Image (cartoon, rainbow, N blue to C red):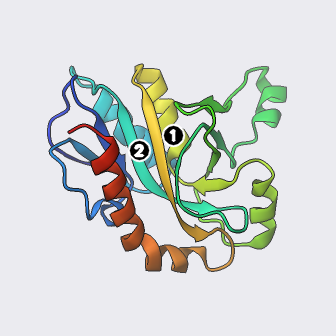
Amino acid sequence: MQLTGQITTDRPLLVLAVKEEAQYLNTSLPVLLTGMGKVNAATSLAAALAGSSKPSEVINLGTAGALRPGLTGTHLIGKVIQHDLNSDLLRTLTGETYGAPLELSDPNGPTLATGDSFIEDEATRERLAVQAPLVDMEGYALAAAAHQAGVPLRIVKHVSDDAGEGASDSWRESVAVCARVLADWASCNVPS
């Protein structure tokens, strides 16, 4: 976890996974880098929100893999799900629901499937594409932490790669371009 700037109630907190995604941000807003994956995202944001001053909102900027052919661009996410948690099985074992889908700020936005791995095989990509058009490694965890803290959240994802074979190599090649697009989006859509 790396936090730059001070969290105050009158400004949003920008949250990104890694420095590569944040490299072009030019802002006076506080920026939290969580590290990759659900555990890093959840624990970092929960720690940042545990202080005495909560931000006006959390805005997650990041990259996502496209699960459906031809999907490109920047997307404001409408719902997040966990693709690597078997909620149905857990419900049969305990009678409780764990990992229910979470609705976000844009009801018309696409669904984002979150899990702790790059999707690098076609069978997994096709299976997940039935549930969501986009996949990442932090979105659901950030939504859960923000929800528990009572802080509004927007998730903005730019497509970095076609999930499937070679996704991690594609991400490395495209992350700088994605970071530029995300920084431009923030400068146009986030009050500083």
Outermost residue on the right side: it is: 92
For the residue pair 10 and 169, the one nearer the viewer reads as: 10
Return the x and y of residue 63 as percentages of the image width and height.
48, 59
Return the x and y of residue 100 as percentages of the image width and height.
68, 30
Q: Secondary structure at mark 2?
A: strand
| Residue 109 position (above or below residue 68) | above
Query: Mark 1 = which residue?
Result: 141
Residue 139 at least partly seen: yes
Residue 1 at least partly seen: no
The quadrant holding residue 154 is top left
Query: At 15% across and 45% down in the image, what residue appears?
Result: 28
Query: At 55% across and 40% down in the image, what residue appears?
Result: 140
For the residue pair 99 and 128, the one nearer the viewer reads as: 128
Image side of residue 164 versus residue 60, left or right:
right
Specify the label residue 60 is tagged with: 2
Marks 2 & 1, CB-CB < 8 Å contact: no
Query: At 27% across and 64% down in the image, what residue appears?
Result: 23
Instruction: Give the residue type that dot 1 points to.
Output: Ala
Query: At 75% across and 55% down in the image, what residue appears?
Result: 128
| Residue 18 position (above or below residue 138) | below
- Mark 1 is surrounded, within 10 Å at the Cα level, by few (under 14), some (14 to 19) or many (20 or more) other residues, namely many
